Amino acid sequence: MAGKKGRILVVEDDLDLSEAIKARLVYLGHYVDVAYEGIEAIRKAKKMLPDIIILDVGLPGKSGYEVCAELKRDPETKNIIIIMLTVYFRPEEITKGLEKGADFYLNKPYKSEILVAYVNKALDTKNPYELSESKCTLTLNCIPEQRIQIGLKGVPNTNDQSDANLLISSDSFVQRAGEAYRNESRSNIKTIGEDLYRMIFSDNDKVLGTYKYACGSVNDPLLRIRFMIKRGLLQLPLEFLFDGKEYLVLKHPFVKTISGIEIKKKHISPLFLNHLVEEKKSLKILLIASNTRPAIPGVDEEFKSLKSLLKNIFEEKGIDVTLRAIPSSEATYEGIRKELKNCKYHIVHFAGHGVSDTEKSSIFFWEKKNKQGKVIPMAVSELRILLSSSDIRFFYLSCCYGTANDDPSRLYEYDFLGIADGLVHAGIPSVLGFRWPVSDSGAINFAKEFYRSLGEQGQTDKAVFDARNCVSSNRDDFTWISPILIVQD
């Protein structure tokens, strides 16, 4: 039973044959589902996203050719490998199947050893990033004074709403979070998280019931949680949610989505990365360090660590990388302006100073090279114009100690999130920002673990989840709780 294991959909209307194929593949350690006709096959394929479909040509309803053609037209299913089965092993039949997108052809009857060989070959030739991970996502649309809209996708899809309105004061929680940071109080963070969990989950039987049902039903051990929020709730510390035993962000990949924003580009995903491999295109990354006054040693250290790491991470998966790395000595205001205007990078990582409020959210750069001249702010309003036609899919705003140029007592009012909000409104589909500045070592370790995970599995929410858990061994360093991932899709 050695070898790579996969998720396989068998589409065969002969009950005895389909069960025989399933039994053989299950014995070898694969996860297998069965469909008996064409429409059912398409429905199951789109829900299951298997690695391989073993597809009979002669099916009731839609034929195998029609099923193959429809799945290969759909961006979400086009990379599924299809092994087509037919009793008509004539050149014209093979040609027809290949034209519809079949990857392999197998004549019936056949020996099971041959089918297993085809399956092993198919798994060996798949793209570097799996599309078949069983995704279960709990979406909670939270608007104060309204019922919580509940969406569950994957086990199976359900939609509901809470019986009562959500009674929550964002300003109060934001202020409490700021006080917890100033006092370096993990116990206060826990108390805030318990209060939020009670108001959103415990006080709403349908929310809590759906959450517990999803946790107990999903095949993938990772239930994903998405909060749909209005723009004004971005600072609400939902990342603090604590269920009495653990913080939810350490149990689940966790994202926020701002409602009412139209995004035209797709965020970083296995589908996007596989497309680069198929098209033999480069993943383009812009790495910027901007260590302006006051100096922050962690900015340049993070830059050096990532410069040597990023190419290797993705190239190990067979993805060509074009990396443009701009150190602090070269990161001038005008130079960065030129790089960002209509830029063609897919990922931008910025480490440096930032200040954020509703009027003057900015990141900062030197006027001249070699850290000479004035320090010039690049306002979010300018960033929105520069990036409006960019190809950026993910923007990482790193945040070491000192990266909020303000009185520490006001950090809860002037955090780094206004910049992230501005980038989302510029059309960037995925942005990682930080609620508070974090330790230099914490920021560096988090960034390195994030990109290691992203390079391995291709999903930003899972990468944040993995990085959080990696750095959470020291819970007194708020690196694990500060990051906030915003994903628009």
Image (spheres, helix red, strand yellow):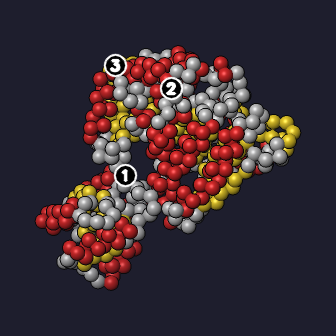
From the viewer's perspective, tell me whether residue 350 is left or right of residue 225: right
Q: Which of marks 3 and 2 is in front?
A: 2
| Residue underneath mark 1 | 133
Kind of residue indicated by mark 1: Glu
- Residue 12 position in % (x across, y down): 21, 65
Q: How crowded is mark 3: few (under 14 residues within 10 Å), some or many (20 or more)?
A: some
Left or right of 260: which side holds 86? left
Q: Mark 3 points at which residue?
A: 203
| Mark 3 or mark 1, earlier in chain | 1
Query: Cβ–Cβ below 8 Å for labels 3 and 1?
Result: no
Pick whichever of labels 2 and 1 is earlier in the sequence: 1
Q: Residue at x 47, y 36 (%)?
A: 473
Q: In this view, does 366 lie above or below 127?
A: above
Instruction: Identify residue type, mark 2.
Output: Pro
Q: Which of the two discs, 3 and 2, labels the residue nearer the N terminus?
A: 3
Q: What residue is disc 2 on? A: 237
Instruction: Name which residue lies at 74% across and 40% down.
Output: 291
